[in-house]
Amino acid sequence: MRYEAPSREEDAVALLAGQSGAHVLAGGTDLLVKLRSEMIEPGLIVDIKRIAGMREIVPEAGGWRIGAGVSGAEMGEHEGLRADWPGVVEAAGLIGSTQIQGRATIAGNLCNASPAADSVPAMVAAGAMVRIVGPKGVREMPVIEVPQGPGKTALEPGEFVASVFLPPRAPRSGDCYLRFIPRSEMDIAVVGCGLWLALDDADRVTSARVVLGAVGPKVIEVAEAADALIGRGLDDAALGDLAAACSKAATPMDDKRGTVDFRRHVSGVLARRAAGIAAKRAKGETA
Amino acid sequence: MSQIHVTTQINGDATEFLCDPGETLMDVLRDRLGLTGTKEGCGTGDCGACTVAVDGRLVCSCLMLGAEAEGRDVATIEGMASGDQLHPLQQKFIEMAALQCGICTPGILVAAKSLLERNPDPTEEEVRYWLAGNLCRCTGYDKIIRAVLETAADMRRAS
């Protein structure tokens, strides 16, 4: 196996395109586990963290561009990002321990394509895009289109995610991510819910995105759940319809961490709670 | 398989080593540099026994390649005491018997030091969350948490 740490994006692309089965190394918290357990035996590892911009969070067009090498801890320490997209920052911050936070990235969380990835529902709810570079050039893709199933992404051979773009946060809007785990820390989501909504001056929802994780082979955006909120205030009836739409849209599996019925129920509960927190944030209250 | 030449800083000392491309920082520290205070527990980033600080940030050295340390600043348990002078956390862990078998202790000390550098007055909850990635199968954690809180109080009084 070779290890390369190019300083230019085009060199990384050439390296990845030049060898089949090459793997990208960002934070390494998934890759090194697979490497050490011999789940993968790549001929080449391309460390992208030495490429300019990969470890930076920069303002862009009113939003934020987050390099593929930025760790969860770095996101959590970034005041501007925290103020605009607290749900995304919290979701990233839930991944693993303090030590994992020192390395793990949201680009890696996305490309690892675990159905239970915490940051992915939050990014989808935020309307995030990724910038993908590859042998055929650069393309942008909505985050929701990247995962194709457990361990599978829409990336073509030789391509990698160079950055995540979080759009400008609309006025009177807010986001939130909640997950259920049986422990208090260091666990994988049994259900996750990312939610973003915008309110008018009468606190009625004008726009929303509701996204579930860990209840299907990939992240699920629930349009019916967003529709259940739009045009309404967050009263019990609206929240009940939101929860019902989420429970209905969830397609979980039964396993030792949660039954199908439990996961469907919790999908609705988390969406309801997330809506309450997102609405407070939309109004500028701390939540 | 050709080896990679890495120039780095470890506990303040300029250090060079050769490593295999797939070799972890933990293996480099232990097997090539003789810094065996860094322990291997799980090897999958779950237990925190191999915790070191890289550029001031905690990482599991089992989940980082040695080659990635090029130009970085690595701090291990061996750099915690100043000569014979133990770090206040080390001293307090001994006084309060905050260890039993000791395998998790270096990782916990490195992690706790990093916490107190960022937050000199943490709550018990903050200490518990910060150290959630450092598993200890002997103590039940209580003495560890108390020792960190007591050290923090001592260090605040001393400063």
Image (spheres, coloured by chain):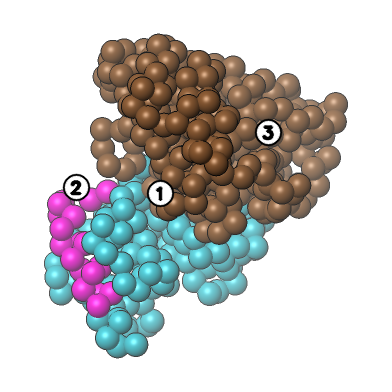
Chain colours: A brown, B cyan
* Among numbered discs 1 and 3, the one appearing first in the sequence: 3
Image coordinates of residue A88 in percent, x first then y, are 52, 42
Image coordinates of residue A261 in percent, x first then y, are 28, 13
Write the residue at 30% across / 81% down. B155
Spatial CA span between label 1 and label 3: 26 Å
Spatial CA span between label 1 and label 2: 36 Å
Q: Nearer the viewer, mark 2 or mark 3?
A: 3
Pointers 2 and 3 in contact (CB under 8 A)? Answer: no
* Circle 1 SS class: loop
The residue indicated by pointer 2 is B137
Q: Within the magenta stretch, is there residue B119?
A: no
Write the residue at 54% across / 37% down. A199
Camera sees residue A190 = no
Image coordinates of residue A65 in percent, x first then y, are 69, 46
The residue indicated by pointer 1 is A287
Q: Within the magenta stretch, is there residue B152?
A: yes
Amino acid type of disc 2?
Arg
